[in-house]
């Protein structure tokens, strides 16, 4: 049965024909906006330093092209075939996370050992790709059903938690708290939607909150992260570092007004008052330069993508497909909320990029693979 | 099928949708509802005011010579926020700076400390501004020194350099005019908080003393402000406003640089002369007034100091010396802040009081060697008797005992220790009418008013001190427990609130608790010379714009008339002439070449010096000239200077020789005191 679906997939001619066009359009529009915003964030800075003002623009275009290719590639193989490869996908993710912790291989940025550097200035962030490993791994386990049962057994839930726990532990060691939070959100959402008993969901929520509290109290969280957290609670606590960043971010967005200061014309952006404005704080560029109109459009586009994803998840009769969709939805929505919420002072500061907009290869590739997975499920649902 | 899963999916969808809506709501709040506030905050972050202090107006003398000007300097500054972040809190950096600038490390250390950071009592040379502005280390660095620092910026973190305009007091004729001109210093927090309603900027300077503070607003001009938009690294991206600086106005003084230099020199000579005669001669003051306008032509105080130390970067030793008793407290202006018993110069007031009380100027009076009042014996000066003499002679030879008798009689008439409800108090009223105990109102800060020890003052004094005197043997130091002092304390406790006979007798010859500043004395003698007008002394003559346009001319302000008949004044004038022709000042003024009227004063001082020796007499000479058609009043006072005539009298004589060009001197005002405003040569204003 799977083979026929697979064959019918290959019979399609157009690149995106048979996929969810609305979602595709929204993603493409976001990618385009992202390229423009990355350019706006870096153009003045680079040219004023005598460097190529299109440096980041060019690299982001390449990232986007690779991302689209990966998304397309992900749709080619029937996702149900992925089940067989799940252990491999998971294993590769874990290996990447281990590699990053090996001194000499991993490099430290902003206090976290999250990157593997390759010759030629090329870097990847294994944690981004590990999210996919975890989602697929958990989906595989949670979609198995004992005959006649409507819900995963406790044993399955525990197994799925184990699948997530090991990579999460490795990410904690980096430490990359933002990614851990997003994975935690994915895990709880997937278990909830799998039909597992409510006690699991509530138990996990309580454990998650208690764990976060214990981590802070016992000093497992580094001073760097604590400062970020403190400055969220009290923005004046650390005015030079993270508090400064958050305050600047809010002011930058707020000063955009309804129409914005005009693309490439944001004085806060051009003055580079917000650090990391081409990566984690890209939304501030949108807020200042294209205003409520543009930044609001971005939120609407995210909303469209997520709602389309929900409808894919609802329409599929295949539990594995649904679980994959739910994992991807949870991942995207929490990452979007965390990132944009952080720039607007709703969430504490963590270093997570904004899907489809932030500059960067790894997250772009991971996000596009995520889109590929959604489309894959869509295409195979009849 | 899988109802729970479907339901959960729906719940999650609602949850995600509400997260996204929350984001939209927050975005709306930030950009639309609260947008204006953030727009303002953004502008605040991006804009910087670059303040160029205005070129300060000049101070010139009455002939247009520069007394204070501006010159180009290279300032080396320290940024404390950077220095404090060094591991050794900047010690190594400042040590390097000291060696490059060839300055003492400790001076630089003190200069870069806020005054509050140094222990109390050891704050000399500290920075009076705040932590957030670059603190000047020197303004007179050489180009090579600055290049050394700038080229090795990694060795000198927090050290900056920039060209500045520095205030310079050129001593055109050798004058210092320390206490007249004043100096500049950093803006304080109080200034910044607009407490005087004027907008200041951190990198501006402000007058801290003398003319520099009194006419600060006129001279400071308006600072130029250029507002620029900057990026996070403070690089300028665009300019949004550019108001150029408006230079300040010039102040023309009544002071004459050449006369000032001569007066300073003669004052110093007089002090040294006193020392040569065996007196301590710790300090002094000399003043020359234009008796018609109140214009201060010269005003000197000894000791003084070079005002340029302030802008050159004051060293710890220099700062300490300014207020040290050992160096004579050069910071203090004796002319307006030194208060001394006026002694016999006061007798002009007593004469007026006697006339008010009905004593005839035609009569003669006994001048015995001593007068006994109660249990105390009051001696004449030198304990000599002069027999029966008229009042002119009494003034000329400075008989004291005549005044003892008159003052005592009047005191008895007023009720003695049980005073009448409205006593005549001729002496007190006369003194008040002559300006004793009241500020002259000169255009300089921190003038003291001296003391008129009348009945009110006495009562007030008693309230403050009765506890001490009534418990003298418990409160006083061991060295103060002599039989005489114990008896004095007993008396003070008993009736210290009353004006006693001894008080009144002492008052009549300018002794006791009476205190006057040399400037008050000069104003008083001016009034005698000009027909009785007490005129407010005035340092500044006019304020003019850089273009030459006159903004303000200071016209003489008469603040009172001497309470004295024309005939009495005439009599006084003749008596003061007699002092010089045939009296106590005859020797000092013999052959001066110009007719001078004046009065000597030799004031007894109670109390002791630091080394325990008793204090020498205060030497006074108060005068005016020419006697027939007066123009100038000259007063000199030398603290612990000995006799009035030999120390101050001779000093005043020398000053007149400079003014009139007699005895080989070049006349300073051959054509009289200049009345026209001088032209200011603007090119002189920017020495570079």
Image (cartoon, grey):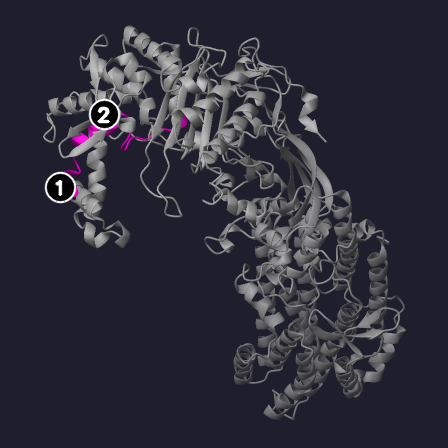
Position in image of residue B191 (x %, y %) = 50, 39
- Give the extent of the magenta segment: B493-518
Is residue A85 visible in this depiction of the protein?
yes
Q: CA distance from mark 1 to mark 2?
A: 30 Å
In the rendered structure, find residue A276 and report the number of the disc placed on it: none
In this rendering, the answer to whether B64 lies above or below A142 is above
Name the subunit of mark 1: B
Q: Secondary structure at mark 2?
A: loop
Q: Is residue B513 magenta?
A: yes
In the displayed structure, does residue B243 sit left or right of residue A3? left
- List x then y, in percent, for residue A380: 78, 76
Question: Which residue corresponds to mark 2?
Answer: B369
The image quarter containing residue A25 is bottom right
Same chain assignment for discs 1 and 2: yes
- Residue beneath disc 1: B494
Between A315 and B494, the one lying in front of the other is B494
**Chain of the residue where label 2 is placed in the rendered structure:** B
Rendered view: B84 above or below B205: below
Q: Is residue A226 left or right of residue B450?
A: right
Q: Is residue B551 above or below residue B74?
A: above
Callout 2: 10 Å neighbours few (<14), some, many (20+)? some
Query: Which of these two is toward me, A361 or B166?
Result: B166
Q: Nearer the viewer, mark 1 or mark 2?
A: 2
């Amino acid at each position: 049965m799977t083979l026929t679906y697979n064959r019918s997939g290959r019979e399609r001619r157009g690149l995106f024909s048979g996929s969810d066009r609305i979602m595709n359009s929204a993603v493409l529009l976001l990618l385009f906006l992202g390229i423009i915003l990355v350019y706006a964030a870096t153009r003045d800075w680079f040219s004023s330093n005598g460097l190529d003002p299109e440096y980041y623009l060019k690299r982001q275009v390449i990232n986007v092209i690779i991302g689209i290719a990966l998304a397309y590639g992900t749709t080619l193989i029937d996702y149900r075939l992925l089940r067989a490869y799940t252990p491999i996908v998971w294993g590769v993710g874990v290996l990447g996370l281990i590699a990053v912790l090996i001194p000499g291989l991993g490099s430290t940025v902003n206090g976290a050992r999250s990157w593997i550097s390759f010759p030629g200035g090329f870097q990847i962030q294994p944690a981004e790709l590990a999210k996919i490993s975890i989602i697929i791994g958990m989906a595989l386990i949670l979609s198995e059903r004992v005959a006649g049962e409507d819900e995963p057994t406790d044993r399955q839930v525990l197994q799925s938690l184990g699948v997530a726990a090991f990579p999460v532990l490795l990410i904690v060691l980096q430490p990359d708290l933002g990614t851990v939070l997003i994975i935690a959100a994915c895990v709880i959402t997937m278990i909830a939607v799998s039909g597992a008993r409510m006690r699991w969901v509530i138990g996990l929520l309580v454990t998650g909150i208690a764990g976060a509290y214990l981590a802070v109290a016992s000093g497992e969280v580094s001073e760097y992260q604590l400062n970020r957290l403190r400055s969220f609670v009290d923005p004046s606590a650390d005015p030079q570092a993270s508090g400064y960043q958050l305050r600047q971010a809010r002011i930058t967005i707020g000063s955009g007004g309804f129409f914005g200061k005009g693309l490439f014309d944001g004085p806060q952006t051009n003055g580079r008052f917000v650090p990391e404005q081409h990566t984690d704080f890209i939304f501030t560029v949108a807020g200042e330069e294209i205003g409520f109109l543009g930044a609001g459009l971005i939120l609407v586009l995210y909303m469209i993508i997520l709602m389309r994803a929900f409808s894919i998840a609802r329409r599929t009769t295949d539990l594995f497909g649904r679980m994959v969709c739910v994992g991807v939805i949870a991942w995207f929505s929490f990452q979007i909320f965390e990132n944009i919420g952080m720039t607007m002072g709703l969430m504490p500061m963590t270093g997570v990029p904004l899907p489809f907009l932030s500059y960067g290869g790894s997250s772009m590739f991971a996000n596009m693979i995520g889109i590929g997975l959604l489309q894959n499920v869509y295409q195979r649902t009849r | 099928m899988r109802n729970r899963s479907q339901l959960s999916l729906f719940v999650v969808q609602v949850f995600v949708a509400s997260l996204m809506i929350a984001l939209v709501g927050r975005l709306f709040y930030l950009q639309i509802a609260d947008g204006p506030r953030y727009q303002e905050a953004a502008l605040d972050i991006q804009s910087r005011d670059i303040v160029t202090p205005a070129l300060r107006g000049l101070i010139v003398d009455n002939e247009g010579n520069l007394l204070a000007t501006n010159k180009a300097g290279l300032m080396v500054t320290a940024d404390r926020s950077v220095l404090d972040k060094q591991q050794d809190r900047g010690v190594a950096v400042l040590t390097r700076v000291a060696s490059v600038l060839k300055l003492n490390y400790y001076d630089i250390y003190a200069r870069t400390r806020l005054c509050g950071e140094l222990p109390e009592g050891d704050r000399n040379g500290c920075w009076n501004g705040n932590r957030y502005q670059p603190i000047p280390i020197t303004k007179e660095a050489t180009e090579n020194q600055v290049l050394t620092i700038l080229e090795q910026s990694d060795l000198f973190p927090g050290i900056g350099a920039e060209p500045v305009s520095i205030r310079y007091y050129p001593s055109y004729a050798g004058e210092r005019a320390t206490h007249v001109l004043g100096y500049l210093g950093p803006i304080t927090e109080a200034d910044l908080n607009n407490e005087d309603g004027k907008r200041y900027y951190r990198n501006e300077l402000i007058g801290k003393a003398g003319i520099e503070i009194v006419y600060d607003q006129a001279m400071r001009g308006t600072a130029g402000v250029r507002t620029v938009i900057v990026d996070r690294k403070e690089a300028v991206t665009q300019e949004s406003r550019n108001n150029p600086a408006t230079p300040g106005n010039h102040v023309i003084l009544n002071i004459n640089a050449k006369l000032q230099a001569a007066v300073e020199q003669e004052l110093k000579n007089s002090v040294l002369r006193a020392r040569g005669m065996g007196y301590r001669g710790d300090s002094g003051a000399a003043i020359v007034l234009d008796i018609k306008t109140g214009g201060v032509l010269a005003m000197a105080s000894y000791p003084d100091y070079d005002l340029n130390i302030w802008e050159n970067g004051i060293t710890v030793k220099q700062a300490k010396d300014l207020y040290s008793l050992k160096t004579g407290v050069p910071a203090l202006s004796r002319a307006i802040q030194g208060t001394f018993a006026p002694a016999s110069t006061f007798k002009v007031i007593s004469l007026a009081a006697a006339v008010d009380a009905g004593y005839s100027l035609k009569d003669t009076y006994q001048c015995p060697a001593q007068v006994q009042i109660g249990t105390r014996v009051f001696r004449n000066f030198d304990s000599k008797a002069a027999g029966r003499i008229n009042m002119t002679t009494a003034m000329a030879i400075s008989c004291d005992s005549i005044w003892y008798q008159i003052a005592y009689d009047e005191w008895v008439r007023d009720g003695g220790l049980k005073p009448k409800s409205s006593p005549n108090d001729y002496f007190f009223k006369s003194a008040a009418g002559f300006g004793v105990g009241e500020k002259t109102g000169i255009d300089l800060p921190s003038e003291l008013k001296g003391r008129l020890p009348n009945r009110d003052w006495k009562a007030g004094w008693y309230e403050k001190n009765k506890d001490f005197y009534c418990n003298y043997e418990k409160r006083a130091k061991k060295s103060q427990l002599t039989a005489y002092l114990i008896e004095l304390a007993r008396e003070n406790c008993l009736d210290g609130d009353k004006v006693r006979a001894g008080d009144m007798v002492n008052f009549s010859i300018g002794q006791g608790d009476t205190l006057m500043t040399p400037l008050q004395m000069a104003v008083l003698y001016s009034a005698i010379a000009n027909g009785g007008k007490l005129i407010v002394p005035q340092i500044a003559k006019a304020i003019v714009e850089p273009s030459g346009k006159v903004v303000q001319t200071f016209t003489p302000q008469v603040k009172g008339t001497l309470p004295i008949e024309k005939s009495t004044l005439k009599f006084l004038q003749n008596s003061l002439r007699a002092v010089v022709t045939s009296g106590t000042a005859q020797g000092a003024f013999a052959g001066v070449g110009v007719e001078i009227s004046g009065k000597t004063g030799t004031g007894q001082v109670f109390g002791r010096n630091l080394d325990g020796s008793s204090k020498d007499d205060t030497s006074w000479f108060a005068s005016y000239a020419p006697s027939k058609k007066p123009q100038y009043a000259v007063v000199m006072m030398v603290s612990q200077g000995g006799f009035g005539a030999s120390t101050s009298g001779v000093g005043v004589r020398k000053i007149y020789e400079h003014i009139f060009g007699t005895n080989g001197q070049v006349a300073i005002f051959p054509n009289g005191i200049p009345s026209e405003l001088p032209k200011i040569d603007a090119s002189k204003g920017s020495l570079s």
